[in-house]
């Protein structure tokens, strides 16, 4: 097959974009380098220039996912005019939105990150998601807006709240409660518990 409209500089991005689509619609089992090449109209050897094997493709998808998630979390952590509670709520909304919008990718991100042979880069990117929240918790503690406690542990509790909510939403287990309403209630309760004396 011909290389079509793809050039050396953008084939990798096109492969990752199409791979995420397949991941979302058909699952990780359906992802093959040869299948991606066929769908993009390139030679079956072309993807090997960017990914040595299927696992390298999955790892790259996870790295891309964590990079995007972390950028969104960093942006959310910086919003709100300095008020920690507003910024924490925005972090929560951002995570829920990402988790619901990219469910299959998020599942892959965590699976690949926790694999015995995961790369240092992947583990660091995954841990950075937690540290973004932990740093904001520490800032909140310094400002007297967040209760005492280990910031990383407080961040884990916050993540468990929003990740659990997203999991319920994806599984259609919120019954008649709209996701936005459930998110605001979960964040209200979480933030009340994070306040000193909460």
Image (cartoon, helix red, strand yellow):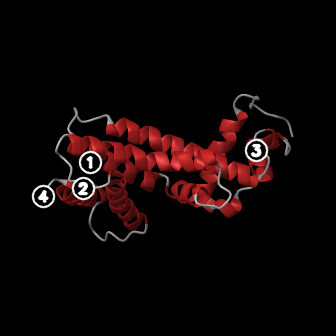
Disc on the earlier residue, 2 or 1: 1
Indicate whether 63 appears above or below 31: above
Q: Which mark is residue 51?
A: 3
Q: Nearer the viewer, residue 118 or 87?
A: 118
CA distance separating discs 3 and 2: 40 Å
Q: Is residue 158 visible?
A: yes
Query: Which residue lies under the disc numbered 2?
Result: 187
Disc on the earlier residue, 4 or 3: 3
Q: Which mark is residue 89?
A: 1
- Relative to residue 68, is residue 116 drawn left or right? right
Percent position of residue 50, x then y = 76, 39
| Foreground tag (4 vs 3) | 4
Q: Nearer the viewer, residue 91 or 24?
A: 91
Asked whether disc 4 touches disc 2, contact meaning CB atoms under 8 Å apart, the reply is no
Asked whether disc 2 touches disc 1, contact meaning CB atoms under 8 Å apart, the reply is yes
Q: Nearer the viewer, residue 72 or 33?
A: 72
Query: Which residue lies under the disc numbered 4?
Result: 197
CA distance separating discs 4 and 1: 19 Å
Indicate whether 41 appears above or below 109: above
- Relative to residue 116, is residue 101 drawn left or right? left
Q: Secondary structure at mark 4?
A: loop
């Amino acid at each position: 097959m011909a290389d079509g409209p793809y050039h050396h500089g953008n084939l990798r991005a096109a492969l990752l974009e199409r791979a995420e689509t397949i991941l979302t619609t058909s699952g990780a089992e359906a992802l093959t380098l040869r299948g991606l090449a066929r769908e993009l109209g390139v030679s079956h050897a072309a993807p090997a220039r960017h990914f040595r094997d299927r696992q390298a493709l999955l790892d790259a998808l996870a790295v891309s996912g964590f990079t995007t998630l972390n950028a969104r979390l960093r942006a959310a952590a910086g919003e709100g005019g300095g008020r920690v509670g507003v910024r924490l709520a925005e972090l929560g909304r951002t995570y829920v939105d990402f988790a619901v919008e990219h469910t299959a990718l998020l599942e892959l991100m965590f699976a690949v990150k926790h694999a015995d042979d995961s790369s240092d880069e992947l583990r660091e990117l995954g841990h950075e998601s937690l540290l973004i929240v932990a740093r904001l918790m520490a800032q909140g503690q310094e400002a007297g807006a967040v209760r005492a406690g280990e910031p990383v542990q407080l961040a884990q509790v916050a993540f468990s709240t929003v990740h659990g909510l997203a999991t319920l939403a994806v599984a259609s287990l919120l019954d008649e409660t709209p996701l936005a309403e459930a998110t605001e209630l979960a964040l209200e309760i979480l933030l009340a518990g994070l306040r000193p004396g909460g």
